[in-house]
Image (spheres, helix red, strand yellow):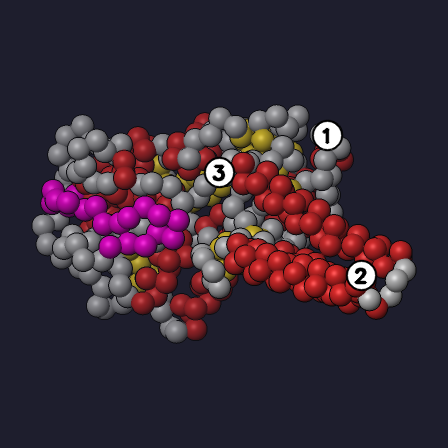
Amino acid sequence: MKRKVIKIIGSILIGIAITFLSFVIFIVFSFFAQRDILFPILGVFFVSIIVFLVLWNIINKKFVYLILLIPVICIAASVSVFRYYFYVDEIPIVRQDIDLGSYIPFATYSSLAILDGESTLKLIDNLPILDGATALYPIYASFAQAVYPKGDYSYYTSDNNYQFFRERELNLILCNMTNGAYDNLFEGTVDIIFCAEPSESQLRRFTENNIKLNFTAIGREAFVFFVNNTNPVSNLAIQDIQDIYSGRIKNWKKLNGLNQRIRAFQRPENSGSQTMLIKMMGDNSIIKPRRENISLGMGSVINQVADYRNFSNAIGYSFLFFSTQMAANDQIKLLFINGIYPSIETIQNNSYPFSESFYAIYVENDNKNENIEKFIEWILSEQGQTLVQRTGYVPINRY
């Protein structure tokens, strides 16, 4: 009888301790994006302990102690999740959202390309509002620096969500990335955007609303693929790329690489590089992109396309100038495609297979800013194309 009382008291004390510990762990887990895995483990852990305590008091058999294997497994699983989480967190990210502070027009330490003399075009008022892709910001910012009045055009705080300050008077040179730029053009809040071709859904949005877009090619760029610099694979055929991103090839060994499963990263839908991938894939369906949970605090998690992490078995893609200049990283290497390396020279001679034009895009209507066409005409002039070349891209016109 005395032993039974001791068991009951012990069970109550253990239950209180486990309940308190579970509550604390629940709060901790709430701040981890992986809580969709950890919460079920915590639930199984808690239930198994309760079951053990109940059976421990009503059945005097040794097999009851086997139930304790369940919470032990739960603890081991949680530790494994945490270890993997921190391991992944240590893998460097090749970021697509970078600090554009060194490319702000008229900044003291600006990295923008400049002309040898004064611009032949000077706009004083009714300045077109510009927006575009991150990779093209250095180009259209240099256009504005050459043509617009001198002023303070800094406008944003560089964080992961690109939250921009809107209160500055000279808020004329935006960079809301490709998807945001097309949204702003559709809503009429900007005059010209500088981007690659729109995705099918982006273009359909304009055509369904009878909005006519004017596309003017102003330069050329290479769409590139990259891997970890330790990866022995340096050259892929177009078919290889299509096989990887359609899921037909899943291991680097089939491409004369190591016996490793391929981690094929993608970019968000309607981004410029994702639109290029879809175009390159042709009729091949694309595997679902890797996604990750990002915790914004307790009770708030978003699920987004995973950023490229430089695993030894990873492959990703971007544009040449962005990957080699704006987000230069000596831990990755660009791949030869069909034996051709992406470079200014191979873009110029059209030998690199993924060479594409980028555009100045505006809405064609009677209410458009009167300076749009003047500005774009100047961009296509020798001076404008000089800035394209000096930035690091290939001019559409050669003089």
Residue under the image location 35 percent in, 52 percent down:
162
Where residue 317 appears, as percent x and y from the top left, is: 53, 41
User: Which amino acid is tagged 1?
Assistant: Leu
Q: Are marks 2 and 3 in contact (CB under 8 Å)?
A: no
Q: Main secondary structure of the magenta part?
A: loop
Q: Mark 1 or mark 3: which comes first in sequence? A: 3
Q: Which mark is residue 258?
A: 1
Q: Which numbered marker is on residue 3?
A: 2
Provide the secondary structure element on which disc 1 rests: loop
Q: Residue at x 15, y 45 (%)?
A: 152
Q: Is residue 225 visible?
A: no
The answer to whether residue 85 is left or right of residue 94 is right
- Residue 168 on image: x %, y %: 17, 54
Mark 3 crowdedness (10 Å alpha carbons): few <14, some 14-19, many ≥20: some
Mark in front: 1 vs 2 = 2
Marker disc for residue 33: none
In this view, which residue lies farthest toward the bottom?
209
Say whether disc 1 or disc 2 marks the residue closer to the N-terminus: 2
Q: Quadrant of the image for the C terminus?
A: top left
Q: Which residue lies under the disc numbered 3? A: 94
Residue at coordinates 27% horizontally, 59% vertically from top-left? 190
Is 161 one of the magenta-colored residues? yes
Q: Which residues are magenta?
A: 147-165
In whole angstroms, how far apart are the C-alphas of marks 2 and 3?
62 Å
